[in-house]
Image (tube, helix red, strand yellow):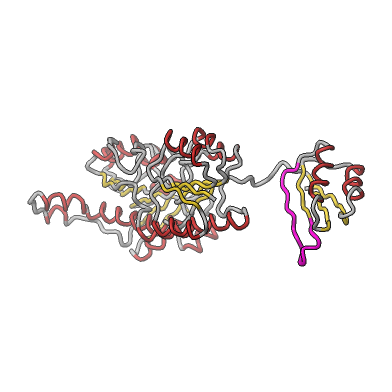
Amino acid sequence: MKVLVADLFEASGLEGLKALGCEVVYEPKLEGEALGARLESARPEILVVRSTKVTAKEIDRATALALIVRAGAGVNTIDLAAASARAVAVSNCPGKNSIAVAELAWGLLLALDRRIPEQTADLRAGVWKKAEYGKAKGLAGRTLGVVGAGAIGREVIHRAKAFGMEVLAWSRSLDAYEAARLGVTRAATLDELASGSDAVSVHLALTKETKGLLGAEFFGAMKPGALFVNTSRGEVVREKDLAQAIAEKGIRAGLDVFELEPPGGTGAFDDPIVKNAGVVGTHHCGASTEQAQNAIAVETLRIVEAFLATGEVPNAVNLSDRTPATHLLSVRHRDRVGVLAHIFAELKAAGINVEQTENVVFAGAEAACARIQVNGAPDEEVLRRIEAGCPDVFSVTLTAL
C-alpha cells in the first residue's frame, strides 16, 4: 500500500511504515495545488499530514485515497465533509502531545509572572533592573482557570497542584463528579471562571462552537493584571478584545497560537497582537518536542497497521455515529461463495439499501452470520426468497432498530 507523507515526520516513523510493507513517498513540503497534483499522480491509499491543509480540492483529486492520518491532535486543517463524501476515513493521534503542550503552557505562565523575556532583553542590552523585576506576584496559592478539560487541560491541572495553585475549570463535558475526581472547582460559566482566576490557560479544540468563544465579555470579567495563556488555537480568541484588555486592564498574555499564522513552518509573520508589550509569544510549537513527535509517530504506525490488517481505523473522527438503517437483517449461513451476493441481490430487487454490514465467521470457517443494517423492512416474501432461494442459508431474522 502506498503512503504519501506530506509533512515533516520522524525518521523512526518513516522506517516503521516501510517495515509494515508500505511504499512510502516522503515529500514534506507539499501543499495546495502541489499536494493535489501529487495525490493525483502518485495515487496513494494513505496520506499522512501534520499542519498541511487538506481541502476538498485536494481530496477530489485523490481518487485512490482511503485514509488521512493527522499526525497530531486536531483535525481542523482537514475538510471532514469532503473526506466523508468520498468515503475517506480521517484519523488523528489524540493525547500524544498533551504533556508537551502542557509544559509550554507552564513555561508561558512562568515567563509572564517573572517577566523572563523582558529580563533577558534588558540583560542583553547591558541594563540591570533588579528592583523593577523583583515585583513578581508568584503563582503559589493563587487560582488558575483552565478552559477545556481534555487531555491537555488535565495535564495542566496535574501540574498546577505541584505549583500549589487552586484550579477553577470549565468544560461543556465537565460535571460535578468528574471535577471532584480531578480535584478542581467546576465553573458553571466562562465568566465565572474569568472573574475567579488569577491566571487562565486555554485548551479548546477549534470547532464552530469555540471559534471566537473568548471575547470582550470574557476579558471584561477577568481580574486586572491577570495572566492569560493560549496554546490551543488562535481562532478561539478574539484578538482585538484581548488587545483591548491588555491595554485597559493590564492583562498579560502568553500566546503560542495566533489568528494570523503563516501557512507553513517558516514565513513572514505580521500579527499585530505580538507588538503589545504585555504579550509573550512562541511559534505554535507547543506540540513540537522530540518526546511528543516520537509518540505521535508510534500512534500513526498503530493506525496504519490496524488499517492494513483489518480495514478498521483507530481514532476515526468522521464515521457516522448512526446510519439511516431502520432494521437489522441477521442471516445465519454456510461460509460459501455466493451467499452474500444472493442476499444483496434480493435486497436490491426489493429497493432496499444496505447501510452497514458485518459477516462474522465461526470457528472452523464452516458457518457465518451476516448482520446487515438496511434502510427499510423487507416483507415476508423477500425474507422467504433470501432463506429458500439459497441452500447455504440456515435462517433469516429481522429486527427493528
User: What residue is shown at x 42% (from left), y 56% (from top)?
Assistant: 97
- Residue 156 visible in the current orientation: no
Which residue: 64% across, 45% down?
320
Q: Does 179 sit above or below residue 27?
A: below
**Residue at x 77%, y 52% (from the top left corner):** 371
Residue 308: x and y, percent?
A: 58, 55
Which segment is the magenta one? Answer: 354-369
Horizontal arrangement in the rendering, residue 231 relative to residue 133 (left or right): right
- The answer to which image quadrant residue 116 occupies is bottom left
| Whether residue 316 can be seen here | yes
Residue 98, quarter of picture? bottom left
Of residues 301 and 325, the one drawn nearer to the viewer in this rendering? 301
Residue 160 found in image quarter: bottom left
Prevalent SS, magenta region: strand
**Residue 61 percent across, percent down from the top left:** 52, 35
- The residue that appears at 91% across and 46% down in the rendered structure is 384
Q: Position of residue 329 (x, y in %)?
A: 81, 49
Position above or below: 382 against 110: above
